[in-house]
Image: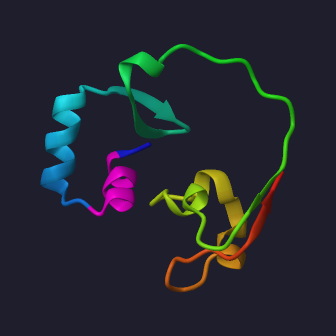
Amino acid sequence: ATADDLRWWAGWTKTQVKRVLTALKPVEVDLDGTTGLLLPDDLEETEKPEPWAALLPALDSTPMGWHERDWFLGDHGPRLFDRAGNIGPSLWW
């Protein structure tokens, strides 16, 4: 996640996010050209999972928890989210 994602998800101020990140000491990683933050204990690479599908209800926190969504939505964002930033029920494959 990025610091903006954390601020968006938690509803914190930039000062609160900075305080928490200073205490956690995350490692900066590249997320397709954006700087993301990862806890040091989570640096180990994992195997690629088998294909799977997820049926998510409206307002699910999985897709709504990201401030910047283009990296996983591409051009589909406007069809999934309303003008207030809420997502309806969705199928993820």
Q: As drawn, is 2 to the left or to the right of 46?
A: left
**Image quarter of residue 21:** top left
Seen at 84% across and 49% down, the residue is 53
In the rendered structure, does residue 9 fall within the stretch colored magenta?
yes
Q: Where is residue 41 in the image (x, y as percent from the top left)?
A: 41, 17
**Image quarter of residue 46:** top right
Question: Which residues are drawn in magenta?
Answer: 3-11
Q: Position of residue 37 (x, y in %)?
A: 38, 34
In the rendered image of this protein, does residue 48 appear above or below residue 66?
A: above
In the rendered image of this protein, does residue 76 appear above or below residue 35?
A: below
Seen at 39% across and 45% down, the residue is 2
Q: Quadrant of the N terminus?
A: top left
Q: Where is residue 16 in the image (x, y as percent from the top left)?
A: 16, 51
Q: Is the magenta stretch mostly helix, strand or loop?
A: helix
Q: Nearer the viewer, residue 41 or 69?
A: 41
Q: As drawn, is 49 to the left or to the right of 72?
A: right
Count of labels in the image: 0
Q: Position of residue 32 (x, y in %)?
A: 56, 38
Seen at 39% across and 58% down, the residue is 9
Which residue is the extreme one toward the bottom?
83
In the rendered structure, does residue 62 fall within the stretch colored magenta?
no
**Image quarter of residue 38:** top left
Which residue is the extreme one toward the top?
44
In the rendered image of this protein, does residue 32 appear above or below residue 53?
A: above
Seen at 48% across and 17% down, the residue is 43
